[in-house]
Image (spheres, helix red, strand yellow):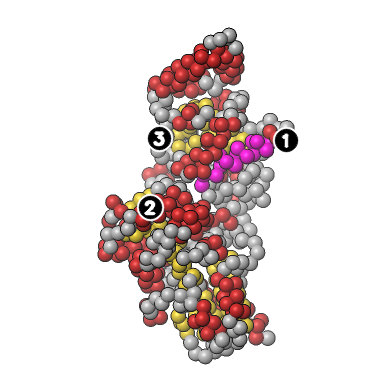
């Protein structure tokens, strides 16, 4: 499909927008980046998604789903307003088409009637299939320039017939719709004002090129429905497409190697197990996913409680408001989603959940730095976005035991929504302090020896602050636990006991916990000097989580160096 697009259209003058962007590797290889491909998804290497800073052929940066049709329409209109006559193509998968933004864009594009080309890459479910060989012929016929020219002339002439022109035109329109209804099964693309062609074999370059040439000549919006097989051409991927959706290195001849078991669970594993236990003891607990069941650890809950599990597709906004409705009915909904995708539902979290003080629990996975996926997938904004919301409780667990305790607290909370943010990382070994009771608004000391320096940290950075303590020397360690709410007087009392209190958080510093703590210190006239370590300035792009922590001086060495610089 990508080869056919580049043969028929004149990129980058013609804009090709890949939705989500996972499927852009062929596009990158075809557009001058073969030599750089070995550095894919590595520090200073090629992005795994389209990136405008990387190449003029990447006309729009993507990474989150359902954006391509809106972006392509904007590119098309922008070209037209500046006197251009180029084409704009949105390539969107059937999964991304479940997102509401895609439907909003389709509605607008159909209304405008401009020649936007939407290529629907359907590799899973059948969307609006046509019936029989004749429908294929009719859909192809409707794209021909001669047909379009005749149609416009016929419609115009019909409307000019004296006295009965409009009546005849309306009759013909209804007749055309009736004929379409015989051959099209509820094809909502046609109802929105698009021409529709398909389904087409997405693995036949000849057929794709022929269709794309016809489509290029159209002056109307069109959907090209392309059927593809996920993993086509590689046996292992064809047999297990979900496992090969996103992979690291693997053997070409033997496929993926079994995952190496470290013995330690990930935070995602810990959440999934804790939710499963909660579901056993409380039938009110409901699990919700936005097309990320496996990635967020909800599979076991789904298997054990299928009637209490809902995957709503790539529709985070709906997921949040759906959860709000469940909460109104007395249930305890738990919505698990990645931090970067929680950004898509800010209004619903505020308007539909927080303002109504509804007991919805948000399990915010991949909070902080995320390996490999680049700038669009870093989970760095959730604290700054959601901490100021009145009535919102935000936790940052440091271990599997703490996460389970915080989930239990959340499911017992009647005062409003609760977020639990945790990284894509292995859980550290447990220590007795992690089992201490959760006290509202208060953290706990991991180490308290009366040292002049204390490091206060969000839970995900526990291993890093332990490393810093080994590298620097004696320091006290305070596990913040609560990002919001905070017992301000309790925190101020702690700050009065130190010469330096270093707040370390895995998130954007602006609007984060450290800035809030600095304001508390100022208001309470605390004696400690406050230093805040977080992500400052440019959002980091590519690299493993450990590399990104090091680059941002949030690893043990970086934290220890900051204390040394204060002590000079």
Above-or-below relation of 365 to 246: below
SS at mark 3 in the image: loop
Distance from the alpha carbon under mark 3 to that under mark 2 = 30 Å
Please rate how many residues cluster around mark 2, counting C-alpha atoms within 10 Å: few if below 14, some from 14 to 19, many from 20: some
Above-or-below relation of 404 to 257: below
Give whichever of 97, 418 is nearer the camera: 418
Q: Horizontal placement of 384 versus 397: left or right?
A: right
Q: Quadrant of residue 561?
A: bottom right
Q: Residue at x 34, y 67 (%)?
A: 412
Distance from the alpha carbon under mark 2 to that under mark 1 = 46 Å
Above-or-below relation of 30 to 546: above
Residue 15 screen position, x and y as percent: 63, 38
Is residue 206 visible from the viewing direction of this image?
no
Give the residue pinned by disc 1. Answer: 82
Q: Quadrant of residue 149?
A: top right
Residue 507 screen position, x and y as percent: 56, 66
Give the residue pinned by disc 3. Answer: 126
Q: Residue furthest bottom?
A: 450
């Amino acid at each position: 499909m990508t080869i056919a697009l580049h043969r028929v259209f004149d990129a980058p003058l013609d804009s090709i927008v890949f939705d989500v962007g996972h499927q852009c590797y062929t596009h990158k290889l075809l557009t001058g980046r073969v030599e750089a491909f070995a550095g894919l998804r590595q520090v200073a290497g090629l992005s795994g998604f389209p990136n405008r800073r990387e190449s003029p052929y990447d006309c729009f940066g993507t990474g989150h789903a359902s954006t391509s049709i809106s972006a392509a329409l904007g590119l098309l209109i922008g070209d037209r307003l500046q006197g251009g006559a180029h084409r704009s193509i949105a390539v969107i998968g059937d999964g991304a088409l479940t997102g509401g933004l895609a439907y909003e864009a389709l509605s607008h594009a159909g209304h405008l009637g401009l020649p936007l080309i939407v290529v629907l890459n359907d590799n899973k479910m059948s969307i609006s299939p046509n019936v029989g060989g004749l429908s294929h012929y009719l859909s192809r016929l409707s794209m021909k320039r001669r047909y379009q020219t005749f149609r416009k002339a016929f419609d115009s002439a019909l409307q000019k017939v004296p006295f009965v022109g409009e009546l005849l035109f309306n009759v013909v329109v209804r007749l055309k719709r009736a004929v379409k209804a015989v051959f099209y099964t509820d094809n909502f693309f046609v109802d929105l004002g698009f021409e529709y062609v398909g389904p087409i074999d997405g693995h036949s370059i000849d057929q794709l090129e022929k269709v794309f040439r016809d489509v290029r000549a159209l002056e109307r919006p069109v959907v090209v429905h392309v059927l593809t097989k996920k993993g086509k051409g590689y046996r292992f991927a064809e047999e297990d497409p979900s496992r090969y959706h996103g992979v690291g290195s693997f053997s070409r001849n033997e496929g993926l190697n079994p995952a190496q078991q470290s013995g330690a669970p990930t935070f995602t594993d810990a959440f999934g197990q804790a939710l499963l236990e909660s579901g056993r003891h409380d039938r009110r607990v409901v699990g919700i996913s936005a097309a990320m069941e496996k990635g967020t650890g909800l599979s076991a809950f789904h298997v054990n409680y299928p009637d209490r599990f809902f995957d709503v597709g790539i529709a985070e906004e709906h997921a949040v408001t759906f959860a709000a409705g469940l909460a109104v009915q007395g249930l305890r909904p738990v919505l698990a989603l990645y931090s970067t995708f929680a950004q898509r539902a800010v209004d619903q979290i505020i308007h539909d959940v927080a303002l109504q003080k509804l007991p919805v629990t948000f399990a915010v996975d991949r909070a902080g730095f995320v390996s490999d996926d680049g700038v669009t997938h870093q989970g760095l904004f959730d604290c700054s976005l959601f901490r100021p919301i009145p009535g919102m409780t935000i936790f940052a667990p440091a271990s599997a035991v703490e996460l389970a305790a915080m989930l239990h607290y959340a499911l017992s909370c009647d005062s409003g929504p609760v977020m639990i943010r945790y990284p894509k990382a292995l859980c550290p070994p447990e220590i007795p302090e992690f089992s201490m009771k959760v006290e509202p608004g208060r953290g706990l000391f991991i180490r308290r020896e009366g040292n002049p320096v204390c490091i206060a940290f969000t839970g995900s950075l526990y291993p890093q602050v332990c490393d810093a303590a080994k590298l620097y020397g004696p320091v006290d360690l305070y596990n913040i636990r609560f990002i919001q709410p905070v017992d301000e007087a309790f925190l101020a009392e702690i700050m009065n006991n130190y010469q330096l209190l270093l707040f370390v958080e895995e998130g954007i510093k602006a609007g984060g916990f450290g800035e809030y703590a600095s304001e508390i210190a100022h208001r309470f006239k605390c004696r400690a000097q406050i230093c805040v370590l977080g992500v400052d300035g440019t959002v980091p792009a590519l690299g493993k989580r450990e590399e990104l922590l090091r680059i941002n001086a949030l690893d043990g060495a970086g934290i220890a160096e900051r204390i040394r610089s204060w002590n000079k």
